[in-house]
Each structure stands twice: as structure tokens, then as C-alpha cells.
Image (cartoon, rainbow, N blue to C red):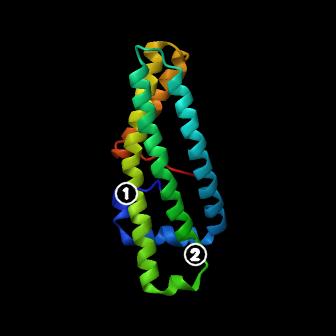
Amino acid sequence: LYDWEIKDALDPAGVSDGLAELATHSSGAIASAHMYQLSSLAFLVFLAGIAALAEPPGRVIAWLGALLAAMSAVVDIPLDASLVVVATHGGSPLVADPAVRAADVALLGLGAVIDTWQGFLSGGGFILLGLAAWRGRYWPRWLAGLAIGNGVLELLSDLDLMPVIPSF
């Protein structure tokens, strides 16, 4: 749901469509958000383990990359909580109330904007982790290249430079 672009987050009709979609799948969205929150916590432990592998020449770069990616994961946790709040309104009679609907639209819009900005942290973090691993050779080169590629693609996506891939 938070894969919207900033321009979509600022369009009340687009966010309203997102609310309608969320209302039809509210229990699935809530379960998914909770699972994603748990995976974000596990990701923090994983990042610390990866950065600890770095040898002294690339240790600072690896820890900086881990810090950026960890900040991104920490920002994701309240974003998912906001998704749970909006999803619980899906089957509620409160949705008919214009004030609650406006608050839901604002919360989803804010979440989409913050999600885009936290993508810069994640992308930069993966690039730095990949560069440190490439330089220190403590990962296979192909794996370090995947980390760098993941970071570059995330940055391009958040900068709206990625081509849109149609879904079927």
C-alpha cells in the first residue's frame, strides 16, 4: 500500500481509492503490517551482524550503511502501525464520518511521503554496506553487487526515475 508515489499521496482521490482497497482487505492488511513490523525488528539484528563482519578498512562504511538501513527499518515500524489504525477503520461505521475519513486520508498520505524519504536511507545504507563488503571481500562479490544494485534501484525508485512495470 505504501508503494505510492508522493504525487499519489497528495491526490485525495488516489488516497481515497487506497482506503477503499484497504477496507476490502483489512484483516489481511493488519496481519501483513504486524508481520512486517516483526521482520523489521529482525532486520535490525541482521544489520548489526553484517556490519560486525567488516574488517577495519571498511568497518566505518559498513557501520554507517547499517545505521542508515536500520534507521529506515525503525521508521517503517510506526508507518505500519498507521496502516493498522486505518485498516481497523475499514469495517467501522466511523468511516462514514467525514472527519475520520479525512484523518485516514491524511494518515495514509503522510505515510506515503515518509515512506519515500525513508527509502533514501535504506537505499544509501545498502549501497554503503555493499561497497564495504566489495572492498573488504568478506562477502562474495556477487552478493556485494546485489546489495549495491538493491540500493541503487531503491534510490531510483524513490526519485521517480524507475520505469513503471505494468502488473498483470
Secondary structure, mark 2, is loop
> Toward the viewer: 4 or 47?
47
Whether residue 59 is visible, yes or no, is yes
Against 43, residue 145 (above or below) is above
Q: In the drawing, does residue 162 fall left or right of residue 22?
A: left
Q: In this orientation, which residue lies closer to the viewer: 7 or 47?
A: 47
Image label count: 2
User: In the rendered structure, which amino acid carries the disc numbered 2?
Assistant: Gly
Q: Secondary structure at mark 1?
A: helix
Residue 94 in the image: state x and y as whole percent. 53, 84
Residue at point 46% right, 33% down? 66
Residues packed near mark 2 inside 10 Å, few (<14), some (14 to 19) or many (20 plus): many
Mark on residue 141? none
Give the residue number, with chain letter if any, for mark 1: 113
Distance between mark 1 and mark 2 Cα atoms: 22 Å
Q: Which residue is mark 2?
A: 90
Kind of residue indicated by mark 1 = Val
Out of 96 and 51, give the one closest to the viewer. 51
